[in-house]
Amino acid sequence: MKFTRKQRNQSWLIACLILMQYSMLDLVKSFQIPLTCSFVSKRTQSLTTQSPSNSIEAAASTPRSHSRLHTLSFFRLHQMKHDEVTDEEILSIPSIDTNANAILAQNSTDGEILPIPNSDTKTTTKVPPPQGGTDSDDDAVTISSVGRTVGAQSDGIDKADFNVSAPDLSRASEAVLAIDPSTIEIIPFSQLSEEGMVLGGAYSGTEFSDGETDSPNPVASSKRKSLFSFVNMFRGSATYIANHRNTIVVFHIPGELLEWEGFSDLMDDISLCWLLGMKPVVVVGCRTQVDDRLMESMDTECDITSLSPDGKQVDCQDEEGTVRYDSVRVTDLDTLRIVKEEAGFVRFEVERQLGRSLYRHGLMDEDSDDGNIVSGNFFSAQPYGVIDGLDFKFTGFPRKVETDKIKQVLNAHDIVLLTSLGVSPSGEIFNVNTEHLASFVAGALKATKVIYFTTNEIAFREKENKKLVQNLRVSDARKVLQYNNVTVNQAKGFTYFEHDARLPLPTKEAFVKLGWCVSSLERGVKRAHIISPINGALLQELYTRDGSGTLISRDIYEGIRVADVGDVTGIFELIEPLVNAGTLVPRPKNVLEKEIESYYVFTRDSLIVACAQIKLFENGFAEIGCLVVKKEYRSQGRGDAMLGYLERLSVQVGCANIFVLSTQTMEWFVERDFAPVSVDDLPPSRQAIYNHVRKSKIYMKRIEDKRELDAAELWWDR
């Protein structure tokens, strides 16, 4: 659009008049002078002022800084082809209000309303475009004002009347956070249960009268649980939070989970574990991503001419277009390139999601140095070589873990991330099985836990009673693998199923994870978990008693057995010092020999280092006595192991109430959740033989299920 010199001069004149008018606002403010509304006629190019009766009382307190905004808005309305306009168009300079701060410009072609920044329009009135105009680019006029009623008319164009009252923002801002003291009342808690849905909050719908006490005070009874479910849950998680702090935990995440809808939530849960004090090492696989890439080119050829002597599986050109040998991929140069690309993809996806989680939940401060996701060359690998005539090429297995470097990163409160790519000292890159890598790294770091996530929702269950198996000892896990003909080669990472084992893929996956859990425990890891991809399952498994997955733990009770007659002398020598000190009741050898079947011993290299006795009574009661640990082996968890074993034995035979009698070691049992009771709480047959002269104190503990014992083991087996 081109303007003539005359039009440009007129525009500059109009602009100067506008600036002069708004520069008078400070003066108007001082004397509260009504400011009239001015109009410009395009046809006459003259400035017209309405009569005072139709004037607009401008808000004289408008800052001078708004003048430029109004001027820019005015110029936008005047960017028209003046020579093509035939009808007169009235342009109004909108009045200013400190409460509204609004100026709107609307384009007649697209109807777009463009607000000026930091503006808040109260009322807008659109002036119609010229009736006889031929230029569709002409802008309509918007009059914006807050204040008294405006009635304006110029050259036959009627201005709309509007009336909007301005709110008192200063008064409203003071009332935003203020509370009228006259509206506050004090009510008893009992009324909350009646009006909880109206009151809302944590008390909503809570019944505060439980019939256990007549006192209206909810804390009158210190034994009952909290009225709030979250408090009970949080208190129950305190033990797990304390036990998991400053512990190294290795997470294995299969590549399939990156496509899972709950993957971002899983990253949130791992970040929360980090926040609660864990030291996470994340190992992520990319098998499914590589398989998808290889499926696009089904040109893999198999040149295997013989099978291994023991008949191990060799899959040539399977349904995924890959060559596998006992679940291990044969990686050629082209496949290695794909593995590099997909390993980089999964690495950055995990980094992105973990970083998002840390920042979104406020776990990382922008200026803090911790909470980083660190990837690097933290382990070296070596090639499989040639096995049974098959060259595995760039397929490898872990060789060495840089434990000092990893621990340095973890101690800096950062997260370590590993992928399937390992580098050899010669500079070669090898594709490593990530399940094997997670087990190898966990063993090298002496991690407290290794956690394997499955790609399918699976669980272990007993066939007869349909009861979930949530805890397996490593010896039991070995038997399960052996029964189902599953072999795990720890050295190089082979997982082998016999040819006649026609198992569903989820079942095979469960056995593979179980095999690597066993491998991890044999490398020195204390516990391993198998968790299904269920939203929140990780936190449920780690921080609650009920759990959500399957726990495989080492045999902390290994060496405990039923005593026999040959152990009488060893037991007598073990308890004799305490009998002489008056801590234990005297037990001659003939009495020990007579009751030997009720004794259990903890042996190490045929040496009895601990012993205990268990007696069963009516009504589901059991008594544990004569619990003694050899002095040289105390403070090593032997006493806790013996107590835990007998508690499990009691629950196994149906005795949920376990009690002990003591005159000297009461505090040791109190620390293990035994509570003092009276003689009347004992079973009748035990009351009849209670020694009222010795006056031993009685402590009792009730065990509902074995999950309570699993939680107790976390405390002393660390």
Image (cartoon, helix red, strand yellow):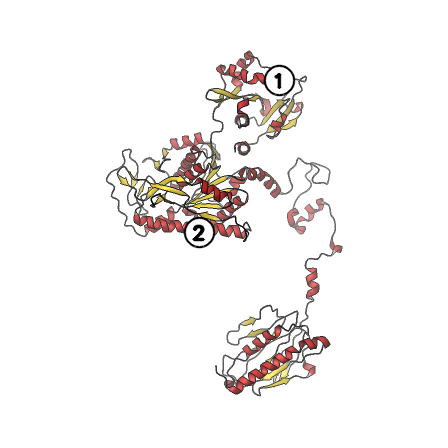
Q: Disc 1 designates what residue? A: 581
Between disc 1 and disc 2, the foreground one is 1
Which residue was labeled with disc 2? Answer: 349
From where the camera sits, is residue 532 visible? no
Name the N-terminal-most of marks 1 and 2.
Answer: 2
Would you say residue 181 is visible in this rendering?
Answer: yes
Q: Is mark 1 in CB contact (under 8 Å) with mark 2?
A: no
The percent coordinates of residue 479 (x first, y second) are 41, 30
| Amino acid type, label 1 | Ala
195 in relation to 173, above or below = above
Quarter of the figure with residue 189: top right
Which residue: 41% across, 50% down? 346
Q: Nearer the viewer, residue 714 or 647?
A: 714
SS at mark 1 in the image: loop
User: Mark 1: few, some, or many residues within 10 Å (few <14, many ≥20)?
Assistant: few
Q: Is residue 49 left or right of residue 422?
A: right
Total labels: the figure holds 2
> Please, what secondary structure does the residue beneath circle 2 have?
helix
Residue occupying the point 53% across, 76% down: 108
Q: Residue furthest top?
A: 590
Please state if 601 lies on the left or on the right of 432 as rendered: right
- Relative to residue 463, is residue 429 depicted above or below? below
Residue at left 67%, top 48%?
Answer: 196
Classify residue 61 by image quadrant.
bottom right
Q: Residue, x 56% and y 38% (percent of image)? A: 242
Q: Name the spot of residue 586 as percent of width and height, x first.
A: 60, 15
Q: Can you tell which quarter of the image residue 33 is in?
A: bottom right
In-image side of 698 versus 363 (left or right): right
